[in-house]
Amino acid sequence: MRYAVIIEDERSEFNTLKEIFKSSSWEVLPKSYEDISHLFCEEKKNELLKSIRVLIEENYESIRIIILDVSLWGRGMLDTFGIDGVLKLIRELDIEENNTWSKQVPIIAYSRHDALELKRKALSSKHHVHTYITKADDTKNKQELLLTAESLSSIFSLNIEAGGFQDNINRMYDSLKNMIISHDEGVETKLNQMEIFLKGEIEHIKNGLDIVLYASLTQLDASSLDDIIGEFQDQLIDVAGMEKTQSIKNKIEKPDIREQFKKFLKSGQFSDFVDFSKDLIKELHEEDIIDFLPGGRILCLGLSSILKIISKSY
């Protein structure tokens, strides 16, 4: 079972989204509009936050997407309460070690108000959203929202699996390393062999994704390829911190770097895209621009960037 959390103050919009998501095998929280509709007002905003906190803490293991109206215009509420109140709450929930879940769960900002300042605040806030979609009363708009939610939730699920996979590898690696050090003088050779063996699973995943993504990647136009590179760049900035923006742009926007990225994407070679990204991120790490990222995490960043752009092309 997978849950979509919809924080929406318009009754008709909530019910429409609920119907669309349930028809695509999602369960929706809250179960009904009436569960929290009475809390959309200034004097009850703390109760609203408490209700959302309890809702998420009780169901977080099955929550795969959060759709948040960032302009909750309830009676007397500030128009940025969705960002300053609800979004901040979600990102700071102490659910797992180091707030891992609350930092990674994908959030779509969804608002009828296309105000540039509101959009800028939602996308640039330290409690960032993954994307901003302006509400419109047409089928195409709702389809865009659903496709975006499907893509982001898939990446989130893969991140969770990769995180668990990485933890298991680290534990296994430490255990075997200690055993080897205790019983064998040829430590370095053994460790190198072990690392190659363990990384084989990542290679298997990459090769499988080559097959899955080939048809979609090879049909993308030049503009979409640029968008993928731009999205990947934005994700690296998000990981490194806004203060590293210019350093990462200087690296990614080099003509030869962009051409290499385009070459791998256009030929449908996702694994080559990931390997090239790993080398690039290694250079950024050596220059103290970004923290070390394991191969599984780089794979997830690349896949997320690609799926986000592909979803917009349909």
Image (tube, grey):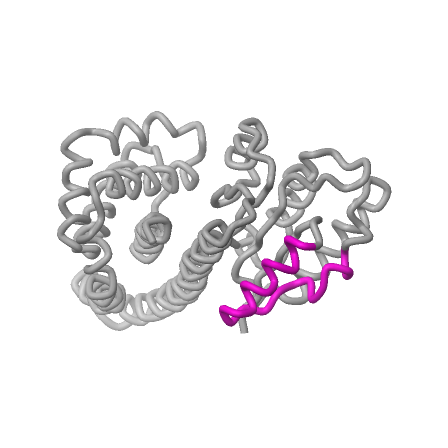
- Choose top left, top right, bottom left or bottom right for residue 269: bottom left
* Quarter that holds the N terminus: bottom right
Please indicate whether residue 217 sits to the left or right of residue 58 in the image. Answer: left
Residue 35 within the segment the image draws in magenta: yes
Residue closest to the eye, 39 or 272:
39
Image coordinates of residue 139 in percent, x first then y, are: 49, 54
Please indicate whether residue 23 sits to the left or right of residue 45 in the image. Answer: left
Q: What residue lies at 70% left-to-right and 61% top-to-bottom?
A: 55
Residue closest to the eye, 181 or 261:
261
Magenta extent: 12-36
Height in image: 15 above or below 278? below
Please indicate whether residue 35 sits to the left or right of residue 105 in the image. Answer: right
Residue 296 within the segment the image draws in magenta: no
Height in image: 268 above or below 130? below
Q: What residue lies at 18% left-to-right and 42% top-to-bottom?
A: 262
Image coordinates of residue 279 in percent, x first then y, are: 21, 44
Q: What residue lies at 32% left-to-right and 52% top-to-bottom?
A: 310
Image coordinates of residue 116 in percent, x first then y, are: 54, 28
Residue closest to the eye, 280 or 184:
280
